[in-house]
Image (spheres, rainbow, N blue to C red):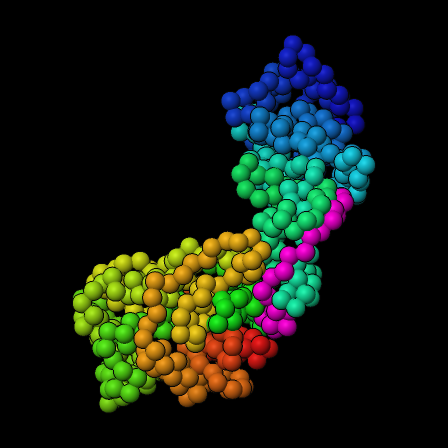
Amino acid sequence: MRSGAKIAVVGGVFVLFAGGVGYGAHNVLSRDDDGTESTSGAVTKKSGPPSAEEIRTTAEDFLAAWASGKAPVAAQLTNDAAEAEPTLAAFRDGARVSGVTMKQGAPVGAKVPFTVSATVSYEGASKPWTYSSELTVVRGLTTGRPLVDWAPSVVHPQLDGQEQLKTGPAAAPPIKAVDRRGRELTKEKYPSLGPVLDQLRRKYGDKAGGKAGVELVISPPNGADTTLLTLSEGEPGEVRTTLDADVQAAAEKAVKRHSEASVVAIKPSTGEIRAVADNRKDGFNAALGGQQAPGSTMKIVTAALLLDKGLVAADRKAECPKNATYQGRTFHNLDHFDIPDGTFTQSFARSCNTAFIKLIDDVHDDAALPKLARDVFGIGLDWDTGVQTFDGSVPEGSGGEAAAQYIGQGTVQMNALTVASVAATAKNGGFEQPVIVPRSLDGRKVATADRQLPGAVWRQLRDMMRATAQWGSGAQAMAGVPGDKGAKTGSAEVDGQATSNSWFAGFAGDLAAAAVVQSGGHGGDAAGPLVASVLKAG
């Protein structure tokens, strides 16, 4: 507390003897309805923003009380004592900290940065812990006193809601994740794998034969702990994955070219995931869990439907006008191009929207596309890859919404994993559910498709993807990829974005890959080079 200030408990309320500093010599504090304290005495209630001196001294008093383990006192210096006290108490009791010091930084307006240094100990294991946070000083609404604006993030910037700090045995033993050739995969070397490795540890740590260590974690009421400090490592068990360190390294490097980029690579003949990479500020594993419209990469599925129904053939003429209207909704091609007297292969390779829209009435079934996406390409079959994934969604639509689905807009939702799987299925001639750990590890069942398309359909689909890579909209991006190759570009318009998302799917040899770049524009411009880099590494 400030020099000369003392606290005592009188009749169940706190009495602050301030020694003439700010509040007078004898103010009694009591609780207001909003969690603040009111005063009885001769002090006039203040108004307006806290002064620089009030900000400095309020922060100083709060940090001093908190550091000394006086959670009730520190809580009374906030504007929500009832909520603040248990979190402040858990800092010492739950996190098992001692020797706490607070270094207060220079205020920036009403915000005061500070650094916490402490020692965390548990059953013989001990480690220093230092981190930074900040608080904001506000004026109490009913008392006019300067108070710390309470939020759990004051105690630690990652605390939110009902989460608490806790030190003890880790929820799962550590793991040593290795690629398909036994090479170790770490967060330090492959940052994008952080969320994946955390999930593998939670799911397979107990099965891998390791021994749990001691950790300081942020523990939510329901959900996975977030490790803040490892006091003892424990003994890791080995978990073999289907990843390939060389392809993963190429994927990590590729996504760094753009902010908000994701890429996934799959072996088509087995569904084994070879690489997963993201470049995102929020740390979200969008490559496996994202949900966005995939744009014209969806035309791989749509083309399979139209070929399967005999409505088109790769070498048959297909109308591609500049614009097409379906049930009152008008669709157009990029820059309003058209292909006079062209084939369906040309429409696919150049990503002609209108060629697909004009054939919807001939399908005579709004549910046909969602059904084929599920039954043939495995979209939405609840995959068990070994980690949590979003496995795509193509819901039934009608009217203009159904037309938008044909070109990967509207309610169609996918991510780099699902689009990579679509490309892999087209290359393989049948669906193999993606996996990131071998099925033999836990004997889990994987999703299987209800049927395969006739061989003639697969051959035409692959040939059209080859045309796209050789002379179509994907040719520039795929120019440096050797051997047999195929591709499909996509651009997806998103509400609130001035520039569309860039999508690209491709295959080369026994590897298929897909990428998405937020606000990347045309598919071949941003996402295409990412896929090409990964395919070359494979």
- Which stretch did the figure color magenta? 230-253
Q: x%, y% of residue 368?
A: 25, 65
Please tell me whether residue 108 is drawn above or below residue 307 in the rendered image.
above
375 is within the stretch colored magenta? no
Q: Residue at 68%, 56% (x, y): give it.
A: 238
Q: Residue at 36%, 73% (x, y): give it.
A: 300
Please tell me whether residue 290 is drawn above or below residue 47 in the rendered image.
below
Query: Could you tell me how many numbered marks the image carries?
Result: 0
Between 494 and 209, the one lying in front of the other is: 209
Between 251 and 67, the one lying in front of the other is: 251
241 is within the stretch colored magenta? yes
Between 312 and 113, the one lying in front of the other is: 312
Q: Residue at 70%, 37% (x, y): give it.
A: 168
Picture quarter with the C terminus: bottom right
Please tell me whether residue 359 is drawn above or below residue 327 in the rendered image.
below
Residue 296 at least partly seen:
no
Please identify the quarter of the rendering in which residue 218 is found: top right
Q: x%, y% of residue 514?
A: 48, 71
Between 105 and 86, the one lying in front of the other is: 86
Picture quarter with the N terminus: top right
Q: x%, y% of residue 441?
A: 58, 55
Residue 246 at least partly seen:
yes
Q: Residue at 18%, 67% (x, y): give it.
A: 364
Q: x%, y% of residue 75?
A: 64, 28
Please identify the quarter of the rendering in which residue 120 is found: top right
In the rendered view, does 5 fall on the left or right side of 516? right
In the rendered view, does 130 fall on the left or right side of 389? right
Please identify the quarter of the rendering in which residue 171 is found: top right
